[in-house]
Structures are given as C-alpha cells and as structure tokens.
Amino acid sequence: MMKRLLDIAISATALVALSPVIAATAVAVRWTMGGPVVFRQQRPGLNGEAFEMMKFRSMRDAVDADGNPLADAERLTRTGDFIRKTSLDELPGLINVLRGDMSLVGPRPLLMEYLPLYSTRQMRRHDVKPGITGWAQVNGRNALSWDEKFELDLHYVEHRSLSFDLRILWMTLRKVLVRDGISAAGEATMSKFTGQKTETTNA
C-alpha cells in the first residue's frame, strides 16, 4: 500500500511539475519526426500480463527494400538520442504509473516476445510490477549483459522494500545527470535477448 501511495504521489507531482518539459519534448519530437509523438507498445507487466507502455518516440519509421525495420542505430534520430540520454523519453511512463500498470521502481518491462525465452528463475522478474527505473538501471543499464541485468532484477524482487525503492530513486536522479549506461557496447540501444536460459543464483 505504501509503495502504491508513493507511486501516485511522486508520479502525479512530477507530471505537474515537469509539464513544461513534457510539452517541449512533445513539440521537439513532432517537429523532427512527425507523428505519433508517443510510442506505444504492448509489454508484459505483473505476472506477465500485457499492458500498453508509453514513451516519447525516439526513432523514425524507416525500413529496407523488403519492408523490414532498419537497425536501431539507423532509425535513432538526433532528437531521439538526446531524449534517451536525458531519460526524457520515459516521462509518459508516469501515466502508466498513475494507472497502476507500472511502478516507479521495478524491473524494466521488456518485449512480449521474450516471455517464452525466460528460464523459470528469470520469469520471476514478473512477480512484481515493472518499473520506470530499477536496480539494473542504476547499476549499468544497457551496458550490462542480459545475465547481469536479470540477476540484478531478481535481486530487487527478492529484497524489495520501501527503503530500497527510495535508494534506487535517489541513485536514478544521479544517473540521469551522468547519463551513463545508455547503450550496450557496439549497439545504439540494447542487443536482442535470444534466450540464454541459465539457472544462475545470487552470489
């Protein structure tokens, strides 16, 4: 209950306080990439149930001769790169938090197509609501390997508490200023998860 109250209080306050920033970001995305301004996609939430996640759009719609989307590096615009590095693309997610689809803190919601690829242990990341930020995000973000990211997610699931959430939120503010871990080595964003089904345990 306290976690939910914290989610509502902070997300509602942030939406009001950051409304000029949100409006300016929306205008910048519209001006440089056209519509839609907000990227919407089905993602797995609590217990793996789908919800519609919202982010500011950071990539243009561009396909090859066969109609397949180009690589992230080729679709990521200069504006998109900036809003990703400053985490401005995550601001619409505050609406997801208000709705109860997400929490401020929790494992990041990944792709629906990854669900069948998880090991039993990895699937436990869906025992809690996904978050805008999380233990993996403040400990390397996309610079982590998939195994490292999952272990950090599971550490959060197994040790979650209100004080842990507050610690992660504070660390997130610092990370946003530093802007590290935005992408994986050699990637514009994060390499695709292919299903390394390793049953690892916490050290």
Image (cartoon, grey):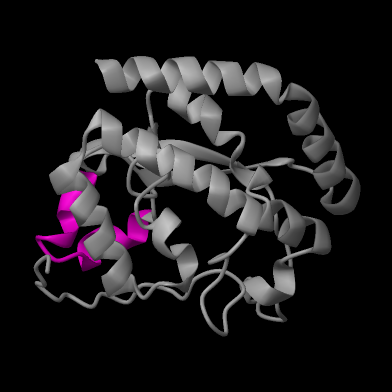
Identity of the residue drawn at 36% across and 57% down: 136
- Give the side of residue 142 with respect to residue 72, left or right: left
Q: Nearer the viewer, residue 50 or 197?
A: 197
Residue lying farthest to the bottom in this orientation? 186
Looking at the rendering, the stretch of residues picked out in magenta corresponds to 112-126
Residue 20, given in percent of the width and then of the height, sits at: 80, 25
- Give the side of residue 7 with respect to residue 58, left or right: left
Residue 108, given in percent of the width and then of the height, sits at: 39, 50
Quarter that holds the C terminus: bottom left
* Quarter location, residue 2: top left
Identity of the residue drawn at 52% across and 23% down: 11
Where 14 sits versus 165, above or below? Answer: above
- Indicate whether residue 36 is drawn in magenta: no
Q: Nearer the viewer, residue 130 or 113?
A: 130
Identity of the residue drawn at 74% across and 31% down: 22
- Give the side of residue 54 with respect to residue 61, left or right: left
Quarter that holds the N terminus: top left
Where 121 sits versus 128, above or below? Answer: below
State whether residue 197 appears in this view: yes
- Give the side of residue 103 with respect to residue 185, left or right: left
State whether residue 67 appears in this view: no
Q: Nearer the viewer, residue 147 or 176?
A: 176
Residue 165, given in percent of the width and then of the height, sits at: 33, 36
Picture mark count:
0
Where 149 sits versus 160, above or below? Answer: below
- Indicate whether residue 116 is drawn in magenta: yes
Residue lying farthest to the right in this orientation? 31
* Quarter location, residue 202: bottom left
From the image, give the main secondary structure of the stretch colored magenta. helix
Where 132 sits versus 144, above or below? Answer: above
Identity of the residue drawn at 27% across and 29% down: 162
Q: Nearer the viewer, residue 145 or 69?
A: 145
